[in-house]
Image (cartoon, helix red, strand yellow):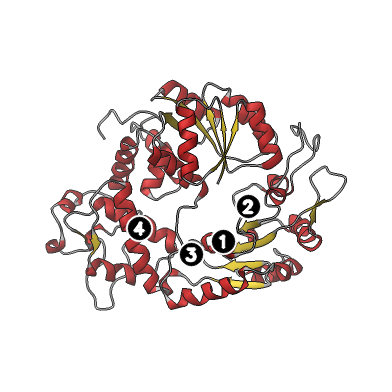
């Protein structure tokens, strides 16, 4: 990932920079917010880490006025609650206490970039897709990757990039579903000075940031039809027009797009251009849903069990045969993302030397699919199946257990939202929604930089 660190790089902030580089980040140093803004306009970044001694509010206000969408992480000495609260109120996504902790920095980078998952596959259904991906990776053909949400479309896109002739150049990802329609054009194509109120300088967009490399248009079906016409021209002519620009800019890049919808049906509905579909769909990599990949379920479940045991500093436990059969029978509508979250919770709830069926709980309390043989389902386990640790859960609602798990994890992370969300296996947005709900209910929620001080 591309990281800008703003502030004086001596002592602890310099150490944070070194740790980030050790984790694979490409770090650019800016001594002040003016330099950081210029770097963002000229070359872009995946995140900005900024010293709280700088004017974070002015920096965030400025990037918002220029329609630059980038996560901002505030850094400060020790557990300075006042500085942490002010930074979060100013719009920082996270507060990172200094001196830096390697695991915490890794968690923050992982949460922001979503680059942490290795490409794990064992099932024959997936092996066929991978063979096709390897065959076309070295070409310049546009690729459309389709599949349900959570199947690993972005992981596949990064795999194609690593196998391509552009592997040493940039891989830039744009989530078309996450960016408001009125901001997406500027995000993709950049803008010229004076193009709109707040555009105080020229800014390059994702097409220019990815020049020479690969541009991933994630969930492209969410793009407005009017913007699709400009995208089509950019792909056909290999040139883009910045917003407010007077002359085109040549670009050389490989386009990969993903969608969880049937774009042929979207064309029939009139919400997606047929000519753009033809341009994107030179090669289609269709990823099967996880429920059709039993060997992948086994391999991924083991990987996540080991990963989150290490992350939470708990003993590694094997997944029992009964628990594995339960996992294999589930429909996994959320695919790999849902499996990861489920195994993460199981690691935290398990007792003894194995992960047993009673630890496989869903966050909303709904049971997994029952076995064809009529054996027990989650939520209806016979008393004999319970372990001593699970007895404490009996008589409590799933919402209560979930709340305690979230707040205890946040307490463990000294109030760091990003680290807690990573441990819990949920998005930072989901975590913040839960914490807002708990605040509304009168439950104390730890602030960034502090542990929980009141019993639940």
Residue linked to disc 1: 162
Quadrant of the rendered image containing residue 441: top left
The residue at the point 59 percent across, 33 percent down is 29
**Which percent across, then down, holds residue 156?**
53, 64
Q: Nearer the viewer, mark 3 or mark 2?
A: 2
Q: Estimate the spatial distance between the alpha carbons at disc 3 and disc 2, rounded to whole Å.
A: 24 Å
**Which percent across, then down, holds residue 200?**
76, 31
The mark that comes first in sequence, 2 or 1, is 1
Of the numbered discs in the image, which one, if any, rests on residue 264?
none
Residue linked to disc 2: 170
SS of the residue under disc 3:
loop
Quadrant of the rendered image containing residue 101: top left
The mark that comes first in sequence, 4 or 1, is 1
**Which percent across, then down, holds residue 317?**
23, 58
SS of the residue under disc 1:
helix
Residue linked to disc 4: 304
The mark that comes first in sequence, 4 or 3, is 3
Proximity of marks 4 and 1: CB atoms separated by less than 8 Å: no
Is residue 423 visible to us here? yes
Front one among 205 and 85? 205
Of the numbered discs in the image, which one, if any, rests on residue 151?
3
Is residue 365 visible to us here? no
């Amino acid at each position: 990932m591309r990281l800008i660190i703003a502030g004086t790089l001596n002592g602890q902030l310099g150490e944070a920079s070194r740790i980030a580089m050790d984790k694979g980040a490409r770090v650019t140093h800016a001594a002040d917010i003016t330099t950081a803004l210029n770097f963002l306009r000229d070359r872009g970044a995946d995140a900005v880490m900024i010293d709280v001694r700088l004017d974070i509010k002015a920096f965030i206000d400025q990037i918002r006025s220029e329609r630059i969408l980038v996560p901002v992480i505030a850094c400060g000495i020790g557990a300075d609650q006042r500085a942490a609260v002010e930074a979060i109120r100013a719009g920082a996504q996270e507060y990172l206490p200094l001196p830096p902790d390697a695991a915490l920095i890794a968690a923050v980078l992982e949460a922001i970039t979503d680059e942490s998952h290795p490409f794990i596959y064992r099932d024959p259904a997936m092996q066929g897709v991978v063979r096709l991906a390897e065959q076309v990776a070295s070409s310049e053909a546009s690729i459309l990757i389709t599949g349900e949400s959570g199947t690993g479309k972005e992981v596949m896109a990064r795999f194609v990039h690593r196998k391509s002739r552009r592997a040493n150049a940039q891989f830039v990802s744009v989530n078309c579903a996450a960016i408001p329609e009125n901001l997406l054009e500027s995000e993709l194509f950049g803008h010229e000075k004076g193009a709109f109120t707040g555009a105080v300088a020229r800014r390059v967009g994702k097409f220019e940031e990815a020049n020479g490399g690969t541009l991933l248009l994630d969930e492209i079906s969410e793009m407005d039809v009017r913007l699709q016409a400009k995208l089509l021209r950019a792909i056909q002519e290999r040139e883009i027009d910045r917003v407010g620009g007077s002359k085109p800019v040549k670009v050389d890049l490989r386009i990969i797009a993903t969608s969880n919808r049937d774009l042929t049906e979207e064309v029939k509905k009139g919400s997606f251009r047929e000519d753009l579909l033809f341009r994107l769909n030179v090669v289609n990599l269709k990823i099967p849903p996880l429920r059709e990949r039993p060997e992948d379920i086994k391999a991924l479940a083991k990987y996540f069990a080991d990963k989150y045991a290490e992350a939470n500093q708990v003993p590694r436990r094997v997944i029992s045969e009964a628990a594995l059969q339960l996992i294999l029978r589930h429909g996994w509508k959320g695919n790999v993302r849902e499996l990861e979250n489920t195994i993460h919770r199981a690691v935290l709830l398990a007792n003894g030397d194995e992960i047993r069926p009673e630890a496989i709980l869903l966050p909303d309390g709904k049971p997994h699919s029952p076995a064809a043989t009529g054996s027990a389902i989650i939520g209806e386990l016979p008393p004999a199946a319970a372990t001593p640790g699970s007895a404490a859960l009996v008589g409590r609602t799933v919402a209560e257990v979930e709340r305690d798990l979230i707040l205890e994890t946040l307490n463990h992370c000294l109030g760091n939202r990003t680290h807690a969300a990573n441990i819990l296996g949920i998005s930072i947005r989901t975590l913040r929604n839960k914490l807002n709900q708990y605040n509304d209910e009168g439950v104390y929620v730890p602030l960034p930089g502090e542990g929980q001080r009141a019993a639940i």
